[in-house]
């Protein structure tokens, strides 16, 4: 497989994974990609996410404090 084809396939897989899973970090995405046989670095994943337009979302959690 050529480098460009590999990049296209990897980015397509990232899009698929983001659509199917709630991924909390690039490290978690790296683990999913590794399980699929992709040997890439965090920097590569970061570039891929930027290139496909993926953005991190802030997650807000509320709770009630008791015993104040």
Image (spheres, rainbow, N blue to C red):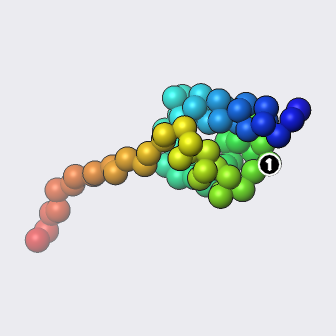
Disc 1 is placed on an element classified as loop
Name, please, the residue furthest toward the right.
1
Whether residue 31 is visible to the viewer of this picture, yes or no, is yes
Name, please, the residue furthest toward the front.
4
List x then y, in percent, for residue 60: 28, 51
Quadrant (top left/top right/bottom left/bottom right) for the N terminus: top right
The relative height of residue 29 versus residue 64 in the rendered view (above or below) is above
Residue at 70%, 42% (x, y): give it: 33
Foreground residue among 13 and 31: 13
List x then y, in percent, for residue 47: 61, 50
List x then y, in percent, for residue 5: 79, 32
Rendering quarter of residue 27: bottom right
Residue at 54%, 38% (x, y): give it: 52
Rendering quarter of residue 8: top right
Rendering quarter of residue 68: bottom left
Count all numbered tags in the image, as a single digit: 1
Name, please, the residue furthest toward the bottom.
68
Task: Determine crowd level at label 1: few under 14, some 14-19, many 20+ residues with C-alpha closer than 10 A.
Answer: few
Residue at 66%, 57% (x, y): give it: 42
User: Could you tell whether 25 is left or right of 1 in the image?
Assistant: left
Whether residue 29 is visible to the viewer of this picture, yes or no, is no
The relative height of residue 8 versus residue 29 in the rendered view (above or below) is above
Residue at 68%, 52% (x, y): give it: 44
Q: Which residue, given by chain and number where applicable, does mark 1 sit on?
A: 39
List x then y, in percent, for residue 54: 48, 41
Foreground residue among 63 and 50: 50
Name, please, the residue furthest toward the left.
68
Foreground residue among 10 and 37: 10
User: Could you tell whether 13 is left or right of 53 in the image?
Assistant: right
């Amino acid at each position: 497989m050529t480098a460009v084809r590999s990049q296209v396939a990897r980015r397509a897989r990232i899009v698929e994974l983001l659509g199917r899973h709630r991924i909390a970090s690039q490290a978690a995405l790296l683990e999913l990609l590794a399980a699929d046989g992709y040997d890439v670095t965090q920097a590569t994943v970061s570039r891929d996410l930027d290139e496909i337009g993926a953005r991190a979302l802030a997650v807000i959690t509320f709770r009630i404090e008791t015993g104040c």
